[in-house]
Amino acid sequence: MEKPKIGVDTKRLEAWDKVTGTAKYNADFITPDTLHAVMLASPYAHAKIKKIDIKKALKSEGVLAVITGEDAPYLTGSMIHDRPPIARDRVRYFGEPVAVVVANTEEQGMKGVSLIDVKYEELPAVNKIKDAIKENPILIHKDLSRYTYAATDIYPKANTNIMDHVKIRKGNMKLGWSESDVVVESTFFLPQSDHIAMETRNSAAQIMHDGTVIINTSTQGPFAVKEELSDIFKIPEGKIIVKTPLVGGAFGGKATIQLEYIAYLASLAVGGKKVLVRNTREEDIMSSPGKLGVEGYVKIGATYDGMIKALECIYYVDCGAYADTAPRMAKSIASDCSGPYNIENIYCDSYSVYTNHGYTTSFRGFGHTASTFCIERILDKLAKKLSMDPSELRIKNAIKENDTSPTQDKITLSNTGDLNACINKLKKLINWEEGTLIENEDGMIKAKGMACLWKTSNSPTDATSGAIITTNSDGSLNLNFGATEIGPGMKTTMAMLLAEKLKMGVEKIHVFMDVNTQVSPMHWKTVASMTTFMVGNAVLKAADDLIKQLKQVGAIALKCQPEDLDVGNEMIYMKTDPSKFVFFKDVVHGYKYENGNAVWGEIIAKGNFIMRQLTPLDKETGKGKSGMSWTVGAQAVEIEYDPRMHTYRLIKAATVMDVGKTINPKTSKGLVMGGMNMGFGLATREEFIHDDDCILQTTSLRTYKVMRFGEQPEYIVDFVETPQMGAPFGARGLAEHGILGIPAAFANAMSLATKEEFDTLPIFPETIYKKKKEVEQ
C-alpha cells in the first residue's frame, strides 16, 4: 500500500539552503551596476513642507539624482488613494519619506541625504485616538471625500478623521439586554507595534530600453505590485515583471506596496538603471508601515447560568497617517466581533481612524489579536462575576453547527470545526483541573489563563490562484504557482499535496521556489492563512488535469480505455492488472509507436481556483460573507508571579486548534509556536511609544523590545481534525492563528495572579507595580 504523503513530517524544500546560509534573498542579488537609493525621513509628525533645497546634495560625490514629492505627483493606496510615495506639500508622520537620493553607493547616498535642506512649518499633531475623533479635530486629510477609492465598500466621513465605519447589527438588542441578568463592560487598549521581520523591506527597479519595468522585491504580493504599479504610473501590465525570491519573514508587513514605488521613481530618475532601496532596521520601524493600534469598548450580558444574550462593542482602529489595508482590518474585527461564541444579539461599530502615527498595514491575525483580546478579557470578567469556571463559560457558549456568525453567515461543522473539542483537549494538556490559581509556600503564585480564538479571511470576493505542472523526461514533475515563500513552508506543502494526489514521492516534485509574474500563474497574495486553501485547490485541479492526460496517453500505449487506468508510483497502470503499466517517463513528452510515429507531445497541466459565494457586508447591518471558513482553537498560558517584586515568569503555553487536516505536522506545530511567541511579544513588551510631539521613540531594537530565547516558556501544540469540505484534503488555514489568543490568555492569568484587572497591553512588571500602588492609594 502506498504510504501517505500528507500527515507525516516532511523536510522543507528550502531547509538545507537556509541552514547552510546559501539561500538567497532579494537584497543578495546586487550586481556591479546596481545603484542605491537612500531616503530622507521627516523629523516631524505633522508639518508643511515649505522648501526643499537639493543643490548641495546634487553636487555631492556619487550622487546621480535627487527625487522629491514634486517629482512624484501621485497618490497611492490599496483601499484609498491617500498616500504620496514621497511626501508632497506636507508630512503626516514621523519618518515619512521626504526625498530620495540615488547614488553609486549607499554611503554616497547617505552623504547626499545629509546635504538636503528642508524648511518645515510644524503643525499640531493628532497623537491619540480621542483627539482624532473629537468635535472639530485637526484634520489629517482635508481632501478625504475627494480621494479615489480603490474599494467600493469604504465609507469615509467628510470633515473628520474617520476613513471608514463598519456596522454589525444582528438580532434584537432590547430583547438581549432584557434577558440578561448580569452585565459587564470594560475598555481595552492595544498599541501600535512592528512586524520585526528578520529581513527588512527592500525593492529594486530597472526600466529596460523597450519600456519593460522589472521589479525585484521582497513581497507577499508580486501580482498586486504589478497591478498597482500599472494603475498608478499608467504602465501596461504586460510591460511589468515582478520577481520575488525567498522572503525573510513578513507577517503581513510585506503585503503592502511602498518601496516598489520609490524604486521605480528612482530608476526613472537615472534613465532606467537598476536601483535598489532597502530599509535599515530603523527605517523599517519608523518609515514603513507597522501594526495597527486599537481602543475597544465592550459590553456583554448573560443569564445567571452563563448564557450570553447580548454584545455591544465599539472599536477605534488607529490606522496612522494613511489608510493602506487598515479599513479591511477594522472590517475583520467587526466581522468576527463575537469571538467563537454564539451570540444572537450584537451591536458593533468599528471605525478606521487617521492619526499622525506611522501608517499601518496587515499584521499576523489581521486585527483579530485585538478583538480576541477584548472579547476574551470580558469573558473572564463575566465568569468572575458569575462565579463560574472560565472554561465552562466558554464551553457553554461555544459556536456550533446551525448557529450564525456576526455577519449572519450560517455555521457548520465543516466550515468552522469543533471548538469544544479544542477546549477539552487544551484543559488536559495544561492540567486545568489542577486549579487555575496556586499559591506556593515560598510566596510565589502560579496562575493559568485561557482564551479561545477564531478567524476567517477577508479576501476580495474574486481572489484567485493558479498552478501549472510541467514534466521531465525522468518522470518527475515541475510545479509553478504564484505564492511567495515567506517562511511557513508553503512550497513544501504544495509539493506534498501534489505527491499525495499522484501517489508518488515528494522528492520527485520540483517546485519553482521564486515567483516571476511573467511565468508564474497568478495568486492574489500570500496572506490571510489562505494559501493552502487557494493554491492547494489550484494544485489539485492541475493534478486532476495531469491525471486525465496521463490516462489518455496511457490508454494509447496500453491499448485500453482511459477509465480502465489509474496512476501511482510514476506509473500508469491497469486497475484490474497493475502488472500492465507504462512509466510516466515514457509518455510525458509524447508516446512513440514501434514504427517511430509519435503522438500527443509534452503534457502540461493547469489548474485554477477562485473564491466562491463571498459577498460584501451590507452597509447598515453588516450582513454578508467575508470568508469561506473559520479556524477555531483554544489557548492557555501558565505563569509564575512574584508578588514581592511584581515580576513574572512564563512557564507554559498551550494551543489546540481544529485545522481540518494536518498536512506537515512538525512544520505546522513550529508555525503555531512562532505565532504564540509573537503573541507573548505583544503581551509583555512590544509597543510603539510616542512623545508629546508624536515622535516615535522606539525606533531600534535597543528601544523596541522583543522576546528573547531564554524567556520562552514550554510550548505545547496539538490539533483537532474536523475536515473542511472543499479544502485540500480537508485542511484549514493555521498560519496566523497561534498569535491570536496568547495576549488575552496571558492577561487573564496575570489578572488572576495579581487580583487586578489588566485591560491594556503590554503588561510590564512596572505596569503591575504602578497598578498596585494606585490601588493602595
Image: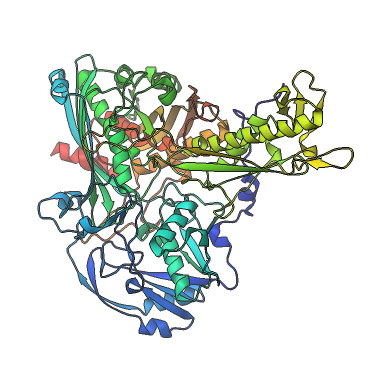
In the image: residue 694, left or right of residue 434: left
Q: Is residue 452 above or below residue 41?
A: above
Between residue 705 and residue 20, name the one nearer to us: 20
> Which residue is depicted at the point 51% across and 42% down?
465
Task: Give how far across and how far down residue 270 sits, in percent.
Answer: 48, 76
Residue 764 makes an appearance in the image: no
Q: Which quarter of the image is occupied by the N terminus? A: top right
> Which residue is depicted at the point 38% across and 61% down?
232
In the image: residue 581, left or right of residue 433: right
Quadrant of residue 43 within the rendered picture? bottom left
* Extreme-left residue of the structure: 135
In the image: residue 207, left or right of residue 640: right
Quadrant of residue 505 within the rendered picture? top right
Task: Give how far across and how far down residue 400 sits, in percent.
Answer: 36, 19
Across the whole image, how many numbered discs are drawn on residues?
0
Quadrant of residue 374 within the rendered picture? top left
Q: How is the image coloured?
A: rainbow
In the image: residue 100, left or right of residue 773: right
